[in-house]
Amino acid sequence: MDVLNPDAPFYGLPPETPLEMPVQSLHVVPARGTKPASSPRGIAVRRLLVVGGAVALTAAGVWQMKLVLAANAVTPVAVFMLVLFAALFAWIALSFTSALAGFVSLLAGGGNGPGRCDAVPTTRTALLMPCYNEDPGRVMAGLQAIWESLDADGAADLFDIFMLSDTTNPEIWIAEEERFLELRRRTGSDRIFYRHRRLNTGRKAGNIADWVRRWGGGYPQFLILDADSVMAAGTLQQLVVMMEAHPDIGLIQTLPIITGGTTIFARLHQFACRIYGPLIAHGIAWWHGAEGNYWGHNAVIRTAAFAEQAGLPELRGRKPIGGHILSHDFVEAALMRRGGWAIHMVPALAGSYEEGPPSLTDLAIRDRRWCQGNLQHLGVLPARGLHWISRMHLLTGIGAYITAPLWLLFLLAGIVNALQARFSVPNYFPDGGKALFPTWPVVDPVRAKWMFVATMALLLLPKLLACIVALTDRATRRGAGGTFRLLAGTMLETVISGLLAPVVMLTQTMHVLSIARGRDSGWSAQRREDGAVPRGDTVRRYLPHTLLGAALGLASWLVSVSLALWMSPVILGLLLAIPLAALTNRRDRTLAAIGLLRIPEETAPPPVLARAAGLARAARAAEPAAMPDRLLENSNLLTAHVALLGAPRRPWHDPLDVPLLIARAKLDEAPSVAAAWEAMTQPERVALLSDPAALRSARAAF
């Protein structure tokens, strides 16, 4: 039965409209079209300014560092340090020139990406919400807020919503279906759909590809949401109109604003992203042009372009580098651009929101998976036919994690180099005594100091420029609590982020080493709100950081006081890793009360955000009944659940389902259904819930 009309048959999915999505080869160049018409004018000059400026800064920095390290004899350690410095300084220099481009672009009006259109959408769009063991009430709260925003704008009939579940937890699976039925009742819409996959082939990328192959033919474009995404109706419509107006565009990425943080760590993160993020996004949009990137969600995608070019191959070799591509978004954008489609970012388009990790520990858990996914891009870099900007995107993703062990190596090499300089006996006559005057060792502490100042300036100036832009925008300035609170928040965020930076550096280094040893990250659901971490877990996780900080502090102090002072920011951050993690994991009351780290979306929440937050609070207050009672007692839910299942196993054709056989045996022998359920493993529970005949037996025994 349909939950909207008891006399109509229930359906949870629309009729399939298949679309072929072939797996792409990384070794064969596909036929490509002409240069995208939406590519901005003068893009070559923009790239010359940004990339050329970074190269010039790097050359100057390396030359000065060479003079700092100059001595009578060039040691292998000094050469090693210079090579590391060149790679790390180039990373900093490119970030600086890109941010400088963003500053100029914002002051000039920030018109990056395809321009806004005044038309209204004329085609139907699918909103896809992939989810994996997420809180169903929270997910449905976001979807309901989006639907209500569209309905208020009179655009709900132009959008179909699909919840694409890859959930493996049977309790959450049934709760998803329950919330889905409730959402249909509340909205009165039969254009909200639910699909569950028992086999999570290809993970998130495979989840999306499954939808494209089954229903992609019915939608000119689709928009990807994350489990914590919320988007306003006007933003959704504008993205569709842009896509309709530019037939060469394959993907348009928005700049999601991070909101909803309640812990100190989350509020620090969302403040930084809100104040500095627009500058960075406008900078990369300014010189990336039609060769932009994709961040995996809050982006609209042309279905035909995605199906034609973005079928991901499995990488050769074993996990963690081989297998299904985890960080699929960068690769999908690169393949689509290789096929001739434009990829754009529109950082000026407001109304796109998401949430960040609530604690340093949650960031580390997420980073472990991202680190593995980004290092997999080493296998994609050699792919034939990629645009050079797309290769830079892949290198950026790799560099985001490779730079961590490089920084650590640079620090350790600096200590070794200082030890050599202190304890080695200088050779005043390197030519065997033929020189009339001795050659004195060259040490230039003044130049070293200025190199440190210059490096810190390149790191911190983008924050200052972003702060200037925020101060010139009245809405942002007032939303952040005024000039004083905005400046104070920037200083507080800079200090705490500076202390956390070496902690993150060591954590990412450990991730890289773990992956190099062949350890797979797996696939775990993210925590979205609560940042509370048991004290013992915090101590165990960050004790190595504290011990390394103590070792570095002792070693540098034994070498010289000046070296210890130079390394003090790193040493202090590592020594304070445990209390910093414990402090920032706490729910923030003091800073919020005095108005620090405030963002405009917190001061005056947009209606769609406020509605989603209210619905999520209401969902948390509703305690669901225990399984399997709530499924077997609710005939509507059970009927809908069976109707939502895929094709049943075909006897003598499909392989035996061993977990199902064991589940049915336990069901037959147990004194009650509840006892059988308690005795089942998670795969057995999933198998039971996936088989209509087994469910009928359970219902009869119940």
Image (cartoon, rainbow, N blue to C red):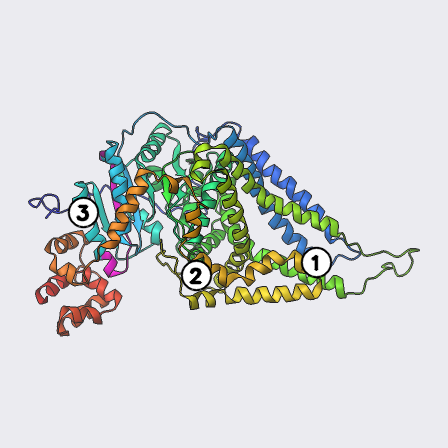
Give the image location of residue 12, x and y in percent.
18, 47
Is residue 335 located in the magenta-colored stretch of the structure?
no
Q: Quadrant of residue 628?
A: bottom left
Tell me the distance, in whole angstroms, between the alpha carbons under discs 2 and 1.
47 Å
**Percent position of residue 581, x then y:** 47, 60
Q: Nearer the viewer, residue 334 or 374?
A: 374
Q: Tell me the mark number nearer the camera, choosing from 2 and 1.
A: 1
Between 343 and 438, the residue placed more toward the observer is 438
Q: Nearer the viewer, residue 368 or 257?
A: 257
Which element type, helix, strand or loop, lies under badge 3?
loop
Q: Residues within 10 Å of mark 1 (few under 14, many from 20)?
A: few
Q: Which residue is mark 3?
A: 12
Give the residue number, with chain letter if any, for mark 1.
562
Tell me the kind of residue under disc 1.
Ser
How far apart are the two marked residues, 3 and 2, measured between alpha carbons?
38 Å
Q: State whether residue 371 appears in this view.
A: yes
Residue beneath the point at 12% across and 46% down: 2
* Span of residues in magenta: 157-173
Q: Is residue 363 above or below residue 391?
A: below
Direction left: furthest residue:
7
- The correct choice, above or below, for 599 with respect to 524 in the image is above
